[in-house]
Amino acid sequence: MAPHLQTDEFFSSLTDLLAKTTQKSRGSVTLSQKPLIDNITTTQPSILIRATDGNTSAPRTMKDGKVVKAKASKATRVKFSTVVPADQLEAFYTRYAEICKTGMTGLKKRDRKRKAKGKGGAKAAKA
Amino acid sequence: MTYLETSQAYLEQSAQLLEAYPETTRITTKYNFPTERPAQVLKRTKSQAKSNKPASTSTEPPTAPIASLTLRTYNPESGITIQYRTNKLQEVGRLMTGLGKLAAGADVASLGLSAPAGADIEMTDAPEEAAGSAPAPVPAAAKGQAQGGKGKKKKGGKK
């Protein structure tokens, strides 16, 4: 398991991953968040954030140690994570939300709809 | 495996689940493009090309399918899964900030208070749910969520 990234590295990797996926219009990006429970109990646990492209055709090691071979040799699995201390959560999520907003452009946009309606309206008026 | 209708309901129920099992509950967010068979791609591009020729008012980009965003709150101990799916870009910011609040351990009340005006419809439901689950012991509250139908039936019976 690769070591956890620093917040900045995590965000730049995430931006890349989202951009790549959107450009390809294929595949998916999975983000997960869960409390990181260590035995030293603190008042509020840190949050572990993981991101992956879930590329199962890339070579990977299963839990029992077996290595699953790649179907396509070029494919690689993108996988990275970071740990956010409880006191930095708010700042982290502000940036996190911003990056998701700008990166997930494959979703339906509100603006485009309005423009389309506007065009349609104009044409209808001309006709 | 319930898909909830509104993001507000999703965030509220997730907050309840996190409250019941704060250590083991995890939230995953999936930004996904649908997989299409080659024939489906051909069909879609053809139909888009058709609609593009007479008027370029197509709401979709010429080749890309529309992605979707699925949020899933899962607790392995109880097997409870809460899901919400959207394909609207404008919801992303609000959802992610919501997840941030959940990660920081926000409860239902604080989510309700900070909700934007768009969530007015859910606000009528929210106090009821909160009132119903608050006096009950925590695991019971979580069970009520898992089988939402049952919880509602119970409430009906009391009336």
Image (tube, coloured by chain):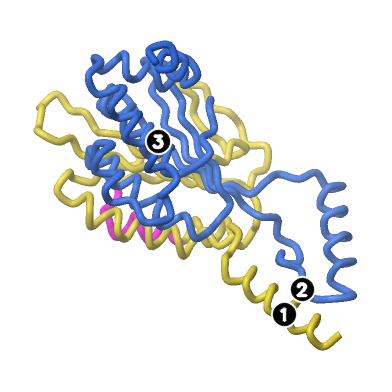
The type of residue carrying mark 3 is: Asp
Which residue is found at the position 82% from the left and 88% from the top? A126
Residue A120, x across and y down, in percent: 75, 76
Which numbered circle lies on residue A119? 1
Magenta range is A4-15
Chain that bears disc 1: A
The type of residue carrying mark 1 is: Lys
Of badges 1 and 3, the one in the foreground is 3
Which numbered circle lies on residue A75? none
Relative placement, left or right, of A39 versus B122 is: left
The colour with which the image depicts chain B is blue
Which residue is labeled 3 in the image? B125
Near-viewer residue (A9 or B139): B139
Chain that bears disc 2: B
The majority secondary structure of the magenta stretch comes to helix
The type of residue carrying mark 2 is: Thr
- Disc 1 residue crowd, few under 14, some 14–19, many 20+, Cα 10 Å: some
Which residue is labeled 2 in the image? B57
Q: Quadrant of residue B52?
A: bottom right
Disc on the earlier residue, 3 or 2: 2
**Chain that appears yellow:** A
**Residue B63 seen in this snapshot:** yes
Of badges 3 and 2, the one in the foreground is 3
